[in-house]
């Protein structure tokens, strides 16, 4: 499971003590709520279903898919579904291919989501070899579903924007610079990322 509210608060308090800009930002936006997802196949399948569509559209497809093929916690239901059934649920040909690939990885035992490598980068590598799972999806899964405290999705646009704002940069830092800036925040970069998304949402409300 993901980082709890208590873990987030403790990590952010440590960051605020060493980085005054974080203290100012926390005073403005407050502490973020936890972002917790269930560990396992269904959460990764949701990631595939939700790619490049709105949250509302993804939820609609998910409900249709579940109604057509059955319990989506069981990868065999995707394996046994026909192309027509997946298309009827709203999956594109590409997403259907990704969903089948993920189901095959899990049912074959090649991917054991209960025993991913302890090393974060090795865990990312194990996930990104699945068709349809990129680095961002892998990092978000490890942060939200496994609660890995030092995951740092530096390629995320909102993270780059808000880290730039929090630290007072005139321009959005690049992925490379965003990664470099966060080196000093180890081993609490996961909490920094969750706070960046929270701060971004607060900025959107102000606008």
Image (cartoon, rainbow, N blue to C red):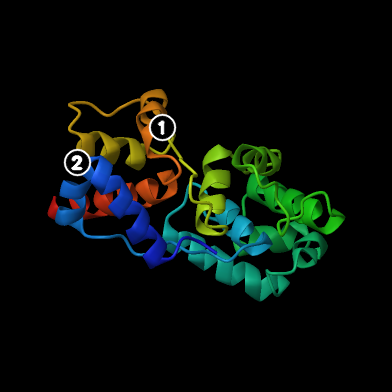
Q: Which mark is residue 32?
A: none
Percent of width and height locating residue 130: 70, 43
Q: Which residue is mark 1?
A: 183
Percent of width and height locating residue 156: 41, 39
* Residue 28 left/right relative to 200: left
Is residue 193 something that shows in the picture?
Answer: yes
Vertical relation: 120 (above or below) 12? above
Q: Which residue is mark 2?
A: 21
Please rate how many residues cluster around mark 2, counting C-alpha atoms within 10 Å: few if below 14, some from 14 to 19, many from 20: some
Q: Mark 1: which secondary structure?
A: helix
Which tag, 1 or 2, sits closer to the chain's start? 2
The N terminus sits in image quarter: bottom right
* Residue 62 left/right relative to 154: right
- Residues 55 and 166: in front is 166
Quarter location, residue 22:
top left
Q: Mark 2: which secondary structure?
A: helix
Percent of width and height locating residue 15: 31, 46
Which residue is found at the position 46% from the left and 60% from the top? 3
Which residue is found at the position 16% from the left and 55% from the top? 27
């Amino acid at each position: 499971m993901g980082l709890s509210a208590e873990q987030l608060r403790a990590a952010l308090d440590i960051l605020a003590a060493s980085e005054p800009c974080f203290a100012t930002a926390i005073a403005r936006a407050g502490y973020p709520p936890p972002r917790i997802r269930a560990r396992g196949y269904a959460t990764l399948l949701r990631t595939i279903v939700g790619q490049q569509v709105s949250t509302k559209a993804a939820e609609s497809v998910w409900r249709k898919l579940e109604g057509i093929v059955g319990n989506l916690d069981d990868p065999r239901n995707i394996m046994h579904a026909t192309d027509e059934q997946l298309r009827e649920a709203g999956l594109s040909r590409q997403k259907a291919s990704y969903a089948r690939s993920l189901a095959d990885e899990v049912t074959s035992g090649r991917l054991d989501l209960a025993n991913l490598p302890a090393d974060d980068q090795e865990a990312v590598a194990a996930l990104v070899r699945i068709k349809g799972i990129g680095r961002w999806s892998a990092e978000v899964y490890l942060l939200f579903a496994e609660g890995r405290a030092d995951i740092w999705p530096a390629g995320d646009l909102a993270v780059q924007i808000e880290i730039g704002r929090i630290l007072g940069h005139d321009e959005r830092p690049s992925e490379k610079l965003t990664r470099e800036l966060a080196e000093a925040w180890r081993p609490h970069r996961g909490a920094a990322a969750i706070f960046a998304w929270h701060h971004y949402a607060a900025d959107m409300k102000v606008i």
